[in-house]
Image: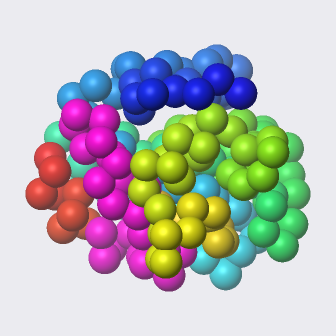
Amino acid sequence: MSVAKTFYELSAPFKGKVVNFSEFKGKVVLIVNVASKCGFTPQYTGLEALHEKYASKGLVVLGFPCNQFGGQEPGTDDEIVESCQLNHGVTFPLAKKSDVNGPEENEVYHFLKNEKAGILGLTRIKWNFEKFLVDKEGKVVDRFASTTTPEKIDSAIAKLL
């Protein structure tokens, strides 16, 4: 795994193409590890609402499907996208399914966790729907637990926009 020194050096595969995060310069980015069969799955609707409310003002919402927590994201990449569109109206980008912890974790989560540790300084992702908020300069400014709903972080996003 390459080790990015800045947020804008990162990249990730989305729907058949690699997206370079340098495309997000000057934008606020919300990154969430997601799963379609989790108790927190209804948060997809709130994430989509944030996307719809703020995309024109510079918010980018990125979902990273992950099957590491209770096997709650068992589908293929195409099945995940289809389910999210059908059941939650999701139009924000979903990355290729990947790990967010451990030796096979994707480079985005490796970077995010090292930039913003969680409670007690722990870096590992504890469950689905943890959220990272990145400001317009590419600085990871906040990390939210799975239990923090998208609605509760609306004001934090609005301040950064």
Query: Was residue 133 drawn as part of the magenta stretch in this picture?
Result: yes
Given the current orientation, which residue lies at the most extreme front position? 121
Residue 137, compared with residue 89, is above or below; it is above
In this view of the protein, can residue 143 be seen by the observer?
Answer: yes
Give residue 137's quadrant in the image: top left
Q: How many marks?
A: 0
Q: Position of residue 150 (x, y in %)?
A: 39, 69
Give residue 12's quadrant in the image: top right
Is 11 or 74 nearer to us in this picture?
11
Q: Position of residue 77 (x, y in %)?
A: 78, 40
The stretch of residues the image draws in magenta is 132-153
Residue drawn at x 63%, y 63% as measured from the top left: 124
Is 71 or 78 nearer to us in this picture?
71
Q: Position of residue 31 (x, y in %)?
A: 47, 50
Q: Position of residue 66 (x, y in %)?
A: 73, 54
Q: Is residue 110 left or right of residue 139?
A: right
In this view of the protein, can residue 43 be seen by the observer?
Answer: no
Is 23 or 81 nearer to us in this picture?
23
Residue drawn at x 78%, y 52% as measured from the top left: 102
Residue 30, compared with residue 149, is above or below; it is above
Colour scheme in use:
rainbow
Residue 99, compared with residue 73, is above or below; it is above
Residue drawn at x 43%, y 78% as measured from the top left: 148
